[in-house]
Amino acid sequence: MDNAPENTLVVLGPTASGKTALGVCLARAVNGEILSADSRQVYVGLDLCSGKDLHEYREGGAPVPYHLIDIAPISAEFSVFHYQQAFYRCFEDVLERGCMPVIVGGTGMYLDAALRSYRMVEAPENPALRRELAGMPMAALADRLCALKPALHNTTDLQDRARVIRAIEIAEYARDHAPPWA
């Protein structure tokens, strides 16, 4: 994502704050295309509760192309890793067309993962590790996670048992499968 900072506009804000309308206006002004950064708008059929204002991409002028909306079935697990991979493909496609990426959304973690190029791995579930961790107290789980890579997990919700266990699972997989130069 070397091109992101100087070749990208970002509209980030809370729900119902006018992000889509502003993003569409900006995209029209700079020959841009919208890349959604919304964790709910990725799901097909989750229209009303996700604030998909798809009509705004067509109203008031030439239609504005948009991406990363309606790309996963509602039954699918769609993580930050999946978003990052889809974002990179769309971002490069937009640049190849000579257009300006305009990122619009309210999911800061999606935006951070995309623009700060988080090094992410697709770690499979590890049933044996999950069984091992299942009986541990939360404090022990938090200690184990922090011992792995405290800087990477400073935003993990240490009160959510499932998230802490998944974070340990990912961190241990990444540690065990790191490339030699990492």
Image (cartoon, grey):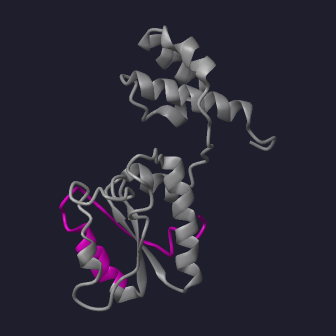
Q: Position of residue 118 (x, y in %)?
A: 56, 49
Q: Position of residue 121 (x, y in %)?
A: 63, 43
Q: Residue at x 47, y 80 (%)?
A: 100
Q: Residue at x 49, y 8 (%)?
A: 135
Q: Residue at x 28, y 83 (%)?
A: 58
Residue toward you, 123 or 19: 123
- With respect to residue 122, does 24 lie above or below? below
Give the magenta range: 1-27
Whether residue 116 is visible here, answered yes or no, is no
Q: Quadrant of the C terminus?
A: top right
Whether residue 141 is visible here, answered yes or no, is yes
Residue at the farthest right position: 180
- With respect to residue 9, does 40 lie above or below? above
- With respect to residue 58, does 79 lie above or below? above
Q: Is residue 19 magenta?
A: yes
Residue at the farthest bottom position: 61
Find residue 43 and report its image quarter. bottom left
Q: Position of residue 133 (x, y in %)?
A: 53, 14
Q: Residue at x 31, y 74 (%)?
A: 23
Residue toward you, 104 or 126: 126
- With respect to residue 83, does 100 lie above or below? below
Find residue 137 and report its image quarter. top left
Q: Is residue 3 magenta?
A: yes
Q: Is residue 175 found left or right of 102 in the rendered image?
A: right
Q: Is residue 176 found left or right of 56 in the rendered image?
A: right
